[in-house]
Image: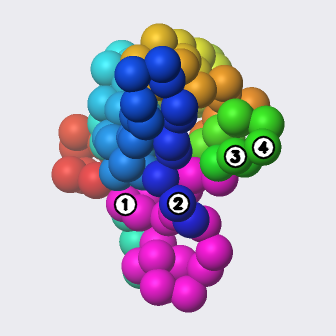
Amino acid sequence: MTDKRKKTESGVLKINNDVIASIARNAALQVNGVQGVKTNSLSMILDIFHKGYHRKGISLDINENENEIKIGITIIVRYGVNIPEIATLVQESIRNALEDMTGLSVAEVDVSIGDIHSETDGN
């Protein structure tokens, strides 16, 4: 997958996929109740063999023709939080950050809960 390019009056703006993923990661981590972003060996396999961008618990699908982006993220939440509420807040946070910072239209933000962090068991 290519990085996102946008033609402006002054030239071409290129936003690397790693930057888009970093914005999404930071936006998710700002939501109270999110402990982290989960990565696993499947992510590494997808990095190598799968079309598109998959890295460190985040997947990107950029539709160049529609100027839209779809994001998938796997998060770790703190024990005791309302998971559907946290997922909705993560979706909103990522959408707002990406649209504000990149000008891309965010079509979807898919959130998966990959783990739960409990203070008592260290997970």
Residue on which disc 4 sits: 65
> Which one is nearer the viewer's eye here, 100 or 9?
9
Q: Quadrant of the N terminus?
A: bottom right
Q: How is the image coloured?
A: rainbow
Q: Earlier in the sequence, mark 3 or mark 1?
A: 1
Query: Is 64 positioned to the left or the right of 85 in the image?
Result: right
Residue type (three-letter) at the residue carrying disc 3 = Glu
**SS at mark 3 in the image:** loop
Measure the alpha-carbon separation of dots 4 and 1. Answer: 26 Å
Q: Is residue 22 left or right of residue 76?
A: left
**Circle 3 crowding by C-alpha within 10 Å: few under 14, some 14–19, many from 20:** few
Asked whether the residues under the numbered discs 4 and 1 touch, taking CB atoms below 8 Å apart as contact, a structural biologist would say no
Q: CA distance from mark 3 to mark 4?
A: 4 Å
Residue found at x 33% / y 42%? 19
Which residue is under mark 2? 2
Q: How many marks?
A: 4
Badge 2 amino acid: Thr
Say which amino acid is labelled 4: Asn
Which one is earlier in the sequence, the residue at label 4 or at label 2?
2
Q: Amino acid at mark 1?
A: Lys
Disc 3: which residue: 64
Q: CA distance from mark 4 to mark 2?
A: 13 Å
Which sits earlier in the primary sequence, circle 2 or circle 3? 2
Of residue 68 and residue 92, the one placed in the foreground of this image is 68
| Separation of marks 2 and 3 at Cα, in angstroms | 9 Å
Q: Earlier in the sequence, mark 4 or mark 1?
A: 1
Give the numbered dot on residue 104: none
Q: Please say if the residues under marks 3 and 4 sit with CB atoms less than 8 Å apart.
A: yes
